[in-house]
Structure formats: C-alpha cells, structure tokens
Image (tube, grey):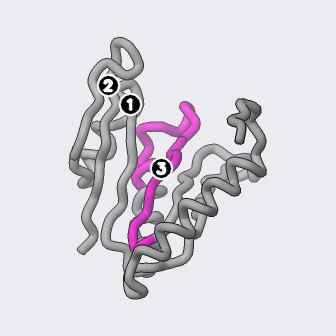
Amino acid sequence: MEITDQFNPDDVNYIKRKVIEYNMEELPDHIKTSDEDISFILRDDFGDIVGGITANMFWHHIHIDFLWVDKRFRKEGYGSLLLKKLEDFAKENACRLIYLDSFSFQAPGFYQKNGYKIFGKIDDHPKGYDLYFLQKRLT
C-alpha cells in the first residue's frame, strides 16, 4: 500500500462517491434524497451575469455554496431576491433547512437580516477575521 499526494479530480470524485454511498447505506429510506446541484443566475439586460446563488440539495436540506452580486448592483435587493428564490425552491422540494458559512468580511449580517441564525463560529479564521455558520429552519 502507498499514499500518493498528487491531486487528481477523478480520485477526489471517487472518494466523494464512496462517502455518499456509505452515508446512504446508513440512512433510513425516508431520509434519503438525491444529491442535486442548484443555481439561480441574475443577468442584466445584455445577458451578462451580474449575480447568482449556487447550492446543493440532499437529505431534505440545502447547503448554499456561493451567493454573489456584482458591486454595481449591491444594496438594491438582488441578494435577497436570489435567496428568496432558493428558499422557495427549498420549500417546493420539502427541505427542512438551509445552511451556509460566511466570513465576517462577507455577509453574515445580510443573512441574519434574512432570517438566518448563527449556530457556530470559528474565531480568527482567517487571521483577523471570523467564520460564521448560519442556518434557517423551514419547518
């Protein structure tokens, strides 16, 4: 046996599939759902991307990966609209909660304003900043 240190996307995907396979073996059927990537994209009148939200849905919950709005359009409510679109999708798909992480220099206050609650925090990560974990229960 040997341990290699070369990054290979196929190897990483294999490990991910094996962990998911194990998890699915351990869970009762009523909890199991498919693993689905989700995105809602905000485009301007020219079709250019000026914002979006990406997430992953599984086990009746959603993890937000990224939410971004171009600097020119921030503070105009587009972030909240994207978040609402994802929340509506979550409710339509019987999801129980949405969760995410946000650095202190990003937008934890934005998420709190939209009904998300902090459930954890890593201080001084990266150095001089904090990492917040937030969730919103839907049921």
Q: CA distance from mark 2 to mark 1?
A: 6 Å
- Residue 123 is situated, as x and y percent measured from the top left of the image, at 27, 23
The N terminus, quarter of image: top right
Q: Is residue 113 left or right of residue 90?
A: left
- Residue 51 is situated, as x and y percent measured from the top left of the image, at 59, 46
Q: Is residue 112 left or right of residue 63?
A: left
Q: Is residue 41 left or right of residue 2?
A: left
Q: Earlier in the sequence, mark 1 or mark 3?
A: 3
Helix, strand or loop at label 3? It is: helix
User: Mark 2 — residue?
Assistant: 130
Q: Residues within 10 Å of mark 1 (few under 14, many from 20)?
A: some
Do the residues bearing badges 3 and 2 touch, measured as CB atoms within 8 Å?
no
Q: Is residue 111 left or right of residue 37?
A: left
Q: CA distance from mark 3 to mark 2?
A: 25 Å
Q: Which mark is residue 55?
A: none
User: Mark 3 — residue?
Assistant: 78
User: Mark 1 — residue?
Assistant: 103
Helix, strand or loop at label 2? It is: loop
